[in-house]
Amino acid sequence: MSGFAVIDLETTGLNPRSDAIIEVGIILLDSAGAFETSWTSLVNPGQSVRAQFVHGITDDDVESSPTFTEILPQVVPRLESRAIVAHNAAFDVGFLNEGFRKAGFPMHIPAEATVCTMELSKMYLPPGRHSLASAAERAGVQMLQHHRALADAHTAAGLLRAYLTAEESGSRFENPVHTRTGTQLGPASWIEAQVRASHLGWPAPLF
């Protein structure tokens, strides 16, 4: 298996159709959760940056940054054939898929190829809130910074490693768990996600 691409995005807002990505952070882990490499970039969204009170990124910060289309040659090889991991994966993958669509890149990452550290916190962590900060605190994962893409990706990677360790020892608080959309998740769902990701037909980049 090719392992995991743990991602975090900062965006101008919450709607992938009308908002845009302003920062990408990617942590690559092998199939056992060991760190391989990391990458990050600010992104020019082509629109005014809102929600600056959340991430602290301003219009001036992204004015000279590459567009999402321009960073595809760096992003795509890092995601290819890996399970995509994120805290609230539906949000980040939704923005990625919309970014692919707007860029004319014929790729769509299915939910089955993703791992959501937020949803899995219900299984592998004691009861509590499921935000990134709350989950990290319960898992004993150090959080150096919040609401910047690479820092949050590091935190999500730490959560995934905590889940891998918990599953290896048979430590579960709930099994199975149900996502907010009603999907049922069983233990070690990251195994099937890696298998699904390895069979995705990533097309040749259109650049």
Image (spheres, helix red, strand yellow):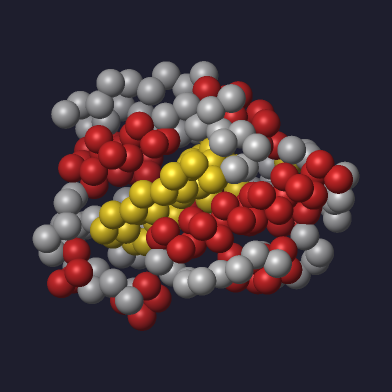
Q: Horizontal and vertical percent for residue 155?
A: 55, 60
Residue 70, picture quadrant: top left
Of residues 49 and 75, the one drawn nearer to the viewer in this rendering:
75
Q: Is residue 142 visible?
A: yes
Q: Answer left or right for 107 relative to 46.
A: right
Of residues 104 and 115, the one drawn nearer to the viewer in this rendering:
115
Q: How many marks?
A: 0
Q: Answer left or right for 207 relative to 197.
A: left
Q: Residue furthest left?
A: 64
Q: Residue at x 22, y 38 (%)?
A: 103
Q: Residue furthest bottom?
A: 53
Q: Answer left or right for 178 relative to 71.
A: right
Q: Residue at x 30, y 44 (%)?
A: 99
Q: Answer left or right for 52 relative to 70.
A: right
Q: Residue at x 41, y 48 (%)?
A: 38
Q: Horizontal and vertical percent for residue 32?
A: 65, 37
